[in-house]
Image (cartoon, rainbow, N blue to C red):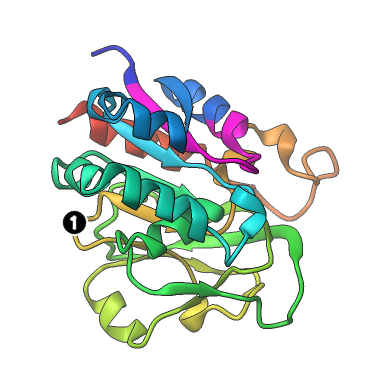
Amino acid sequence: MSQVPALIIAGPGTNRDRDVEHALKLAGAATRIVLASELVAQPSLLQHARLAVIAGGFSYADSLGAGRMLALDLVAGLGDGLRSFVDAGRPVIGICNGFQVLTRTRLLPGALGHNAQGRFDCRWVVLDPVTPSNSVWTRGIEDPIHCPIAHGEGRYVHPDAESLAAAGQVALRYRSTNPNGSVADIAGVSDPSGVVLGLMPHPENHIVARQHPRSTRGGGGPRHLGLRLFENGIRHAKEL
């Protein structure tokens, strides 16, 4: 298999689907962007994919809560389709709104609440990959990852963050600053199998060095790309 068939799931209001598409193509995937409604009408699209991304944005304008309506689309329309996809070992990543969707579909533990400071926040952050972690998406990554955030409901909450970490399900933590008040500085979590990853920051918006706001200014040391997450996901999908 030369290119991994990857599905990018979007909804009304999603705005990072093209960014994700560019990241996946650069990492070696053959991509297709589909609305959740299209996927429900043609579930074979998911069956033929080997990797899936739920892209970020503001699906349904975050009506009734961030990610709620898109999650309902997927659960009501696909039934156990996404769960079967994961059970087959196929990697899934949900970014920002996609992370919110994955917690609402119960494919990931915990939930996302309003930022602790009570307002939308857009800035660059630095993420530390957690070791040990069961995530196939962060496997082998030791350097910090630089990427932006853009969210108002990104505060990760979980009743027992210590047990989550002990199980290897904390994949990423905020290093530079905790921008939203997430428990234990958690920026990304995985499911028990390690094939599902959710994170609020946008690694798809730092896949080439020039995207960093200080790329031409010097100073601050190396700025590591988010592209490696997508390369890991594709590498795992090729091994299936």
Give the vertical position of 169 relative to 197 (above or below): below
Q: Are there few (<14), some (14-19), or many (20+) residues within 10 Å of tag 1?
A: some
Q: In which quarter of the image is residue 163?
A: bottom left
Magenta part of the protein: which range? Answer: 5-20
What x and y, as percent, mark residue 200?
A: 55, 59
Out of 180 and 144, give the one closest to the viewer.
180
Looking at the rendered structure, the number of numbered marks drawn on it comes to 1
Extreme residue in the right direction:
217
Looking at the image, which residue is at 73% across and 82% down? 117
Residue for badge 1: 193
What x and y, as percent, mark residue 230?
A: 43, 37
Callout 1 secondary element: loop
Judge from the rendering whether residue 20 lies leftward or rightward of residue 38; answer left or right: right
The type of residue carrying mark 1 is: Ser
Looking at the image, which residue is at 21% across and 40% down? 85
Judge from the rendering whether residue 33 lies leftward or rightward of residue 19; answer left or right: left
Q: Quadrant of residue 114?
A: bottom right
Extreme residue in the top direction:
2
Looking at the image, which residue is at 58% across and 66% down? 64
